[in-house]
Amino acid sequence: MIRAWAGALAVVIVGCTGGSPNSNPDSPRAATKAAPVVADVPTKTAPVTPPPAVANAGAGEDWLVWWFHGDTWRTRWLRVDGEAASVVGEREALIVGDAGRLWQIERADTEVAVKSCQCEHDDLKRCPDAGKVTMLGLRARELGGDSAVTIHEARAEPLQGEDMEFGLQVVGGAQARLIVESSDSGYFCGAHGSYSVVDTVFDVAAGRKLELQPDWWKQLPEPIRRAAVQSIEKEYNGCHGTDLSTNELMNEHAYFAGAALTLVRGAPTITWKLAVSAMYVCSSDYAYTGQSTSGLVAEAAPLGLAGPLPAGVTAALASIGDAKSLGFSRLTLPDPERAARLAAFTAASERPWPELGSRARSIGGSAGQAKVDEGRKKTREKNYAEAIAAFDAAIEIDADLVSAYAGRGYAHLLAGDRERARADFKTALRKSDEPKLQAAVWFNMGTLAAQENDTKAARTAFEKSQAMRPSKQAEAALADLDAPGN
């Protein structure tokens, strides 16, 4: 798990993992994400430096505003003069700009094979396909030119697992800086599934992820940081048996976990995410994540979200109303360059934006496996009663379907029924000697024992999991057992 910017905004929020491309078996507690809290932040915005004069274009400035609403992107070219803004052009597409350059943002997806967990990992090409899945990608193509920049590269290699889902969306930005959120979930050959979210900021003009100082976010107004941390303080202290104050959590333990820009009743609104690292028995993503919201503030300048926006742009946004994602770009275009860029903008292709997510398509799956997939989906949704019912149905169809016992045990564990969980885990271990599944089940057995404060049994289970399939999660769990006080 990445717990800081590490040179770019790249924060991973990982849920109950079971061997995904970037993760391994994890603990069974659902990720904690608090509802956003509106921070009471005094109005304070950074001054905007006036752009160079735009020759022969009349008074005013050129701006692009782009937003996602319903199921598509729209970009509007505005001519802004004081409090007035006129629409020069509009495209059903995502187009961003920086100074005199414009890019159209496009999806660049690939389709890859899904292989069975019974295949040997080092010989996947020889293994028959069990399904297909669309891997999501993103690129920027410069308008009026031939160059293209890869923003998010789609995976090209086969995947192992079942019931996979992937997501990719732009959640805001300014100028040519895009905040991109990617996610994946599924069962990657473990006893239970995984869930991860990665936020990155990509500078299209520079052709790379944005590099920022690791602690830049500590300059944000205190009300923003405090509101986010306070939303998770009680749960964190309750699980860890600590009594840390908001200041201690905020100043000594919190880290930045992302941001997004939306339009709420015509007002640009930033959602800030701060997280605090947690023990594996407290949260399956090893973190509690809290949120708060604010308007544009001067301290958000590193993301380009400082403001203030010209009155004409503000009025134009107010006329749009609400949008799931929002961005804006100011252009500096002297004629005849302005005419050429406007012509390229007007000619930009308009086509429906692809789905924001994709799901693996199985080939010839059994009725029992379909019920297992349903149970896993209900488990991810934290609907444990329906998940257990689906696993029950899978076992009724096929009493030897080991994944059904492992999945039902995991759902029982999440629901707090340790005895039923233990019984299902033991059945899964008895019915299958497949190392990947056994490693994940032993990890769950270790988590169960840790919850019962049986340190010896927990250590034995985690060691067995680590021996069968080394993972950072099992390593971290053993390290927690060796920590002072355990």
Image (cartoon, rainbow, N blue to C red):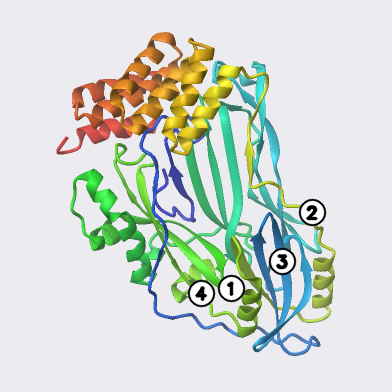
Nearer the observer, disc 3 or disc 4?
3
SS label for mark 3:
strand
Q: Residues within 10 Å of mark 2 (few under 14, many from 20)?
A: few
State the residue at coordinates (42%, 35%): 16
Q: Nearer the viewer, mark 1 or mark 4?
A: 1
What residue would you read off at disc 3? 75
Tag 1 residue: 266
Callout 4 secondary element: loop
Q: Earlier in the sequence, mark 1 or mark 4?
A: 1
Q: Which mark is residue 351?
A: 2
Label 1, label 2: how far apart the Cα atoms are: 26 Å
User: Type of residue at label 1?
Assistant: Gly
Contact? badges 1 and 2 (CB < 8 Å) = no
x 32%, y 37%: residue? 280
| Residue designated by label 4 | 306
Query: Earlier along the polypeptide chain: callout 4 or callout 2?
Result: 4
